[in-house]
Image (tube, rainbow, N blue to C red):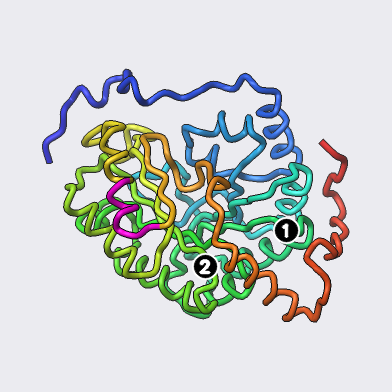
Amino acid sequence: MKMDPSLHRDRKPDWIKVRLPNNPEFWSTKSLITDLKLVTVCEEAQCPNRWECWSQGTATFMIAGEKCTRACGFCAVKTAKPDALEEDEPQRVAEATRRMGLKHVVITAVARDDLKDGGAEHFKHTIEAVRSANPGIIIEVLVPDFNDRDWALEMVMRARPHIFNHNLETVERLTPLVRSRAKYQRSLTVLRKAKAMVGGMVASKSGIMLGLGERRDEVLRAMDDLLEHDVTVLTLGQYLRPTPRHLPVVEYIRPEMFEDYKEVAIAKGFKHVASGPLVRSSYHAADFRPELDIIEAVETALREDRGIEVGPEHLRLPEPKKGILTAGV
């Protein structure tokens, strides 16, 4: 694969610019995350948008630790033997969403192939804790593939997230190079199964990185594959090399090409597309609102399941466990 050596000099193209923090809200968010001993994918994956998102009081929480059992060629999250799950982490995440007054939260996790359920039950507990602490919040999950174990995926879906996100990451040809242990068709299957498990009442989402050597026809094929597997929301962003040990950037995609891909994706049938050099799976996630019928169906199903006749705003706020700070920000 031919690459331009100039791609890996310190200077990146002019359209790859990151805003540094100049808003007190950034430091408030950082303090809150530190206070509650939480991990965010914003920091662990070296997201270029963390300054902007944190300045707006938003963050993507990464549960189940900060050590991943997989070693994907693009990801900055460390690969190591994971620590034991922290039982009170779901409540700490829930408390963070309450303090921040979030209307939309994204919950993701490292791959936990060391656990039989891949961390699915931990996702379930976190979703339930967040919903109880912050009624009415839109809950988005960005999950690993759980090694395609249906019973594990069902645990997550029974907790009824509003948005289910699992990233394809790249085109089929490059998947073995880019994604450790993951399989292109398996990811598509997980996306379809998750939606089917709740009768279609979840907004499904996936993302693709560009600049790894993919061809245009392969990107379009990936779009078609996602649509065929009932995905309605798509994110497209530029791959940026975290360290010299990671996969090299083959090409910096120009902004106008991202705009072109967005137009094509909308024309193909995606309901929402975020496409740009610095777009990531969770970037401006709250800008997308799932169809109202999905939100109503999720909330109605939850009330019926729990025998609740009132709205979600009447759900009781659980008492925090010992050691969790509850003072307002």
Query: For numbered disc 2, what is the local secondary structure?
Result: loop
Q: Quadrant of residue 269?
A: bottom left
Residue found 77% across the figure and 48% down from its top:
98
Residue lying farthest left? 2
Q: Nearer the viewer, residue 70 or 33?
A: 33
Q: Is residue 317 left or right of residue 290?
A: right
Q: Quadrant of residue 160?
A: bottom right
Q: Quadrant of residue 179?
A: bottom left
Q: Amino acid at mark 1?
A: Gly
Residue found 47% across the figure and 63% down from its top:
204
Residue 20 position, x and y percent, is 54, 21
Residue 155 position, x and y percent, is 59, 75
Q: Nearer the viewer, residue 259 or 145?
A: 259
The N terminus lies in quadrant: top left
Which residue does the numbered mark 1 point to in the structure image? 136
The stretch in magenta equals 263-270
Numbered badge on residue 118: 2
Residue found 67% across the figure and 33% down from its top:
30
Label 2 packing within 10 angstroms: few (<14), some (14-19), many (20+): many
Q: Nearer the viewer, mark 2 or mark 1?
A: 1
Residue 136 position, x and y percent, is 73, 58
Asked if residue 254 is positioned above or below residue 235 in the image, the reply reads above
Label 1 packing within 10 angstroms: few (<14), some (14-19), many (20+): some
Q: Amino acid at mark 2?
A: Gly
Lower position in the chain sequence, tag 2 or tag 1: 2
